[in-house]
Amino acid sequence: MHYLIIGGGIAGTTATEELRKLNTNADITIISEEEHPVYSRVLLPHYVKEKIPRERVFLKKETWYAEKNIEWMTGVICDYLDVRNKFVRLSNGREVEYDKLLIATGGEVRTAPFDFAQGINERQISYFRTLADSDHLVTLLSERDASTQGYVIGGGFIACEYINIFAHFGIPTTVMLRSDRFWSRVFDEETGRLVNQRLLNGNVEIKKSQTTNYQLPTTPSILGIGIGIIPDFSWLRDTGIKTNIGILANEYLETNIPDVYTAGDISEFQDVVVNRQVNIGNWMNAQMQGRHVAKVMLGEREPFKLVSSYATNVLGLEIIFVGDTDRSAAEEIVVRGSVLDGGVTQLFLRNQKLVGATIVGRNSDRQPITAAIRDQVDKSDFLG
Amino acid sequence: MPKLTIKVDPDLCIGAASCVTIAPETFQLNDENKAYVLDHGTEPTPRTYERVIEVTEDEKENIILGAQSCPTLAIFIYDEQGKQLFPEQ
């Protein structure tokens, strides 16, 4: 039996590790676009801020793969999949057969279409997804002087990281939002105001900009872009694998094609906790799905069940997302707290159940909310 | 039963809560959104980021799994001899 894992990130590597743990004899191959062993993307801001040395971001040593008898192919991507004859073709031309295939390729960073004629130097632009991106940012930061300005485009998790990094190095910062608030598709006005207030108190300038014609000055600057990730489905065309935002999967993380599974940021799976097909791009979800899908690939028949969450902070203000935070999928949203109180929690409800929440500046809400989502308690029992 | 020293570095912890999901009897989050250490769901001494607890082999394995799940490697585990079990050195 040959297990082929596409994607060397945390979902793919965790699946690989679990497969080996549960089946010592299986042939396992993992294909990674990057040349490095798996590393923690969550640790990259710590590295950039010089809180940890670069080598601390790695979660496995290079020797780990061979020690575990795992074939590790780096620096290649898949450019073709044949689900009928069960093989993939790699970017180096090699073909690899499989019995069971896991797609855990995550997402590609969404790039901003700049008019470079405006005087923006491409080198000033920073994305923040990979270790190479982080190395580039470290270089840019090392070249800063007293006149360096930080610009951030985007209003999500990555934008928060840039703001924190620029603040750490004392670089004056301007953030450019398409809307009037961060996470405009998730946050209500009050939560948005709370975040904006923290930014303004931290001397971050907020500019609203509908276009990518950002009018950046030509003075020394670093332009951090965090406008999301997009999955690459191009190599899946003609396979019949169904996709939407991500690769569609059932509660077992199986796609509609036999022996093809998916996990991590690229999966859009049937979430049995919130009873909806969701795409969740966070570390906990990717790691737990990786572990779970390995068991399913080995024949276990348990649905994936997790209330995942992600936490960050911007200039010390804690921001936590729990469960299904898609506003458009909520039937009712209950808001607790206010800017004046220093914290706002939004509760997302559907079918009389709590399915998700955003918690900003109200950390103590997290535990009871997570438990209520997990236990699928009735709205009346939770809200009183 | 083996004794483990379990330590959370609050400077590294970002409150991702993976450890809480995997080993809730050992880790919970405080109001600063940092993981602290419990002894089988209890706090026999004041709230702390470091604790020595006695565990079964199964519990030990699960606690190490919780530490491995931490995206910032903020959890350190040592055995009775002071040898660092995780992160592996």
Image (cartoon, rainbow, N blue to C red):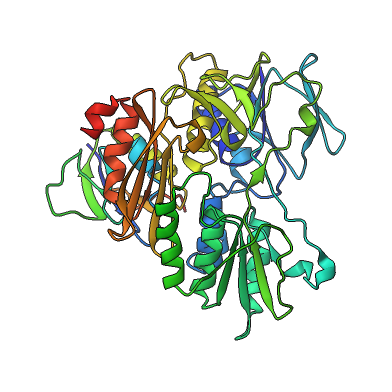
> Residue at point 40% right, 41% down?
B18
> Residue at point 51% right, 56% down?
A181
Q: Quadrant of the C terminus of chain A?
A: top left
Tell me where residue A279 sits by quadrant. Answer: top right
**Residue B47, position in %: x, y?**
18, 54
> Residue at point 61% right, 45% down?
A63
- Residue at the extreme bottom: A146
* Residue A151 or residue A294, whichever sits in front: A151
- Residue at the extreme left: B44
Left/right placement of residue A58 relative to residue A308 reads: right
**Residue A225, position in %: x, y?**
65, 59
Left/right placement of residue A283 relative to residue A207 reads: left
* Residue A318 or residue A49, whichever sits in front: A318
**Residue A291, position in %: x, y?**
50, 30
Relative to A45, residue A167 above or below: below
Q: Quadrant of the N terminus of chain A?
A: top right
Tell me where residue A152 sits by quadrant. Answer: bottom right
Q: Is residue A362 visible?
A: no
* Residue A371 or residue A187, whichever sits in front: A187
**Residue A173, position in %: x, y?**
56, 72
Marker count (numbered):
0
- Residue at the extreme right: A93
Left/right placement of residue A231 relative to residue A46 reads: right
